[in-house]
Image (cartoon, grey):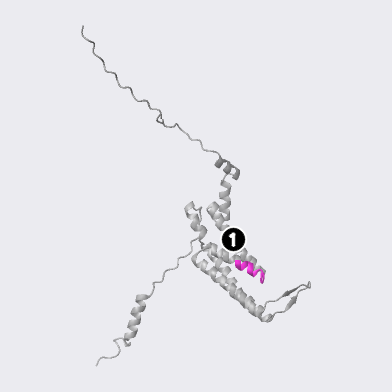
Amino acid sequence: MKSLFDDDGDKPATLSERLSGTFSGAFARPSRPKAAPPQEPQGVLSSGERRKAMSGLNAIEVKWSKAGLVLASVLSIVIPAVESSTHPIRKVASNVHGKTGYVFTSQEWLLIAVVALVFCGLGFEGLRRRKRTLVAFTFFILGFSFTLIFAPLGFALILLGGWLLLRAYRIQKFGTANAKMAAREAATRPPRRERKQAARTPVKATGHKPPTANKRYTPKATPRKKVAKPAE
């Protein structure tokens, strides 16, 4: 009688397990290796490489953007949770100067947390796709939102978004995002007034022009036939 176990002592796989393994292997998508963000370029980029660098993010920008989004995500949960537990109902609060203002209720804090987390998710999606414009837009929206509830974080996020756009401007104008290299490139260029004057001045052609054909054409006259003299 044949044993139910193989030579190693393990029970052989059933028909359903074999079929599930076959189908899972046939339809499973191969995992794509995640491309690492490019490093900070050490030299000046060419005109063809600048557009790609402006739209994407390098390793330094990815690191700072990820830190800002993680901090914004954590505080989007912590601040509404603390404030909603402190002020569960709407009431009028007065400060030292006697000015009054409304305090958000727990439902309103929950709505603020959800909206902030949605924009944080949008920022993470832009970070995954290496889209500079999307990440900077997210930082601006989150920054202006957090200035109403936690001003230091709001201003920090606005500065982070402006930093990303400033680096894109440097890449477009000077071919590098590094401040020192951009200043060095700006020093080697002529002043703006001279560049405008050179652009307005027409360039004179040098060298002799090749001879051109004359438009006036006179056809050659047909030679006259010689008439023989009559004999005397």
State left or right for residue 117 relative to residue 49: right
Where residue 16 sits, quadrant-wise, is bottom left
- State the residue at coordinates (59%, 75%): 114
Q: Does residue 179 show up?
A: yes
Prevalent SS, magenta region: helix
Q: Residue most toward the left?
A: 231
As for residue 59 lying within the magenta part, the answer is no
State left or right for residue 79 relative to residue 8: right
Residue 30 in the image: state x and y as whole percent. 39, 72
Residue 2 in the image: state x and y as whole percent. 25, 91
* Figure quadrant of the C terminus: top left
Q: Residue most toward the top?
A: 232
Residue 100 in the image: state x and y as whole percent. 75, 74
Where residue 190 sits, quadrant-wise, is top right
Q: Does residue 40 show up?
A: no
Q: Residues within 10 Å of mark 1 (few under 14, many from 20)?
A: some
Residue 9 in the image: state x and y as whole percent. 32, 88
* Figure quadrant of the N terminus: bottom left
- Compared to 161, does 227 lie above or below? above
State left or right for residue 55 relative to residue 226: right
The one of 203 and 62 positioned closer to us in this rendering: 203
**Residue, disc 1:** 163
**What segment is highlighted magenta in the picture?**
141-150
Q: Residue flagged by tag 1: what amino acid is it?
A: Trp
- Compared to 23, does 182 lie above or below? above
- State the residue at coordinates (53%, 69%): 124
